[in-house]
Amino acid sequence: MNGNPSTSIPPEVLRVKQRYSIIGNAPALINAVQRALQVAPIDLSVLIIGESGSGKEFFPNIIHDFSARKHSKYIAVNCGAIPEGTIDSELFGHEKGAFTGAISSRKGYFEEADGGTIFLDEVAELPLTTQARLLRVLESGEYIKVGSSEVQKTNIRVVAATNKNMLQAVSEGKFREDLYYRLSTVQINIPPLRDRGNDVLMLVRKFSNDFAEKYGTPAVKFDEGANDAIMRYRWPGNVRQLKNVIEQVSLFEAGTTVDAEHIKRYLPQYGTDYKPTVASAPVFNYTQEREMLFKLIFKMQNEIDGLHSRIDSIMGARHAGGQNVEDNGKIHSLVKYTQFKPSEIEDINIENGAAEDVSVKNDVDYAEDGTGMTMTLEDTERETIKKSLERNCGKRKKTAEELHISERTLYRKIKEYGLE
Ligand SMILES: Nc1ncnc2c1ncn2[C@@H]1O[C@H](COP(=O)(O)OP(=O)(O)OP(=O)(O)O)[C@@H](O)[C@H]1O
Ligand SMILES: [Mg+2]
């Protein structure tokens, strides 16, 4: 816990946090934002240092947007993603015939972004030859296109980022020492998530609300034990990992209150020493997956019902279980699909309110229990309502909320399916 009231944060930092949706009040994070704001108007190179997933990418944007270059171009380049053979040409351009396949000359990013800012992400991955070219641009603004002998000038500000230990890279001969010092005239350090105290729980709340909205599910709640487990975890993948975990929890535990045991299933290597490995996805059981699919199907079915009613009223026809839309093109095909296996749903894609892209495999044996039984939409609906009622201890208001239907519809369905 860091006990850092947001009241002591300068108003300009609060505004930046809001503009870029940066969550957290940890002093080290606030310092980083403040430093970015201070250095933005001064035309110096900046090096952003922080572990993977810690949120480095906000900072070059802040620096550009608060500089005099804000109306010029901002180009972000991921140096680690460009093959060694083409990176010089990507950054500095090439002349026609410079290499096999260079059928015309091409501008590089340093020419494209002239007058603006270039963000060199994963800068430690630059090959040594490219490092030499970069040093020259930083020192004199000069560069030479690949295959050319003509010196060109550019006026560009460089902001770089890395999650590597640069001094180690220098000592191992992988990164030029002179370039390191030139790049890091100003350094901004982004703290790892595990050192940000209560920010972790603020991020959990923010992401669970965002994902609930994205997936149209009720937001997950976390009990004290879960919060405690979240706070104790070392978050090797930082905010990116936390966001991933909350997305999975929001999908698979929608509408429930998650406890410590539950949340630990989503946290690899819980309780072991910190090892910065890539977090592996948790294993979900079939029941969880099926329940989630039930919910999605239930939501889809409500949407389909809504479509039927709308079509009926438009056509002035009496609603008769969808029969009266039989001649109505593709919408009709929705009505036919009454039998399916939830886990066999494929390519569900309702775009712009059109229903023609919904394709569901039908007539498939659904044999979770080995009976070869096929589930109908009614079975699915009944099952979904039953599960939701159980989860909400029979409370109809909560159940209706969770299922996104009115209480009146819920009463009717409970009666219809004999679930009293
Ligand atoms: N303080 C924060 N508030 C809200 N979202 C955040 C915060 N920090 C990071 N994120 C989110 O976490 C994710 C990872 O952040 P980002 O891509 O900036 O990481 P990074 O430091 O660049 O990692 P890498 O070194 O792997 O490139 C992004 O989706 C980002 O929006
Ligand atoms: Mg990044």
Image (cartoon, rainbow, N blue to C red):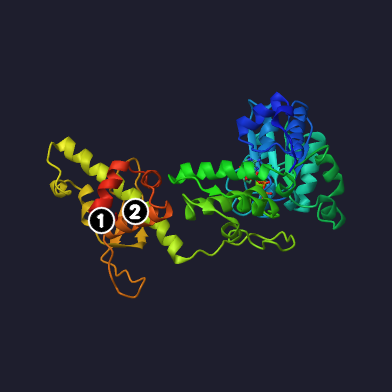
Q: Quadrant of residue 95?
A: top right
Is residue 139 or residue 34 the one in the foreground?
34
- Asked which secondary structure carries label 2, the reply is helix
130 with respect to 200 (left or right): right
202 with respect to 155 (left or right): left
Q: Are marks 2 and 1 in contact (CB under 8 Å)?
A: yes
- Image quarter hosting the N terminus: top right
In the image, residue 152 sits, relative to residue 54, either above or below, namely: above
- Image quarter hosting the C terminus: bottom left
Q: Amino acid at mark 1?
A: Tyr
Residue labelled with disc 1: 417
Quote the CA–CA distance across marks 2 and 1. Answer: 9 Å
What residue sits 47% from the left and 51% below the top? 254
Work out whether residue 151 can be spotted.
no
Is residue 72 or residue 100 the one in the foreground?
72
Q: Amino acid at mark 2?
A: Ile
Image location (x, y in percent) of residue 355 = 29, 46
In the image, residue 310 sits, relative to residue 40, either above or below, namely: below
Image location (x, y in percent) of residue 237 = 67, 53
In the image, residue 380 sits, relative to residue 162, either above or below, namely: below
The numbered disc on residue 202 is none
In primary-sequence order, the first of circles 2 and 1 is 2
Residue labelled with disc 2: 385
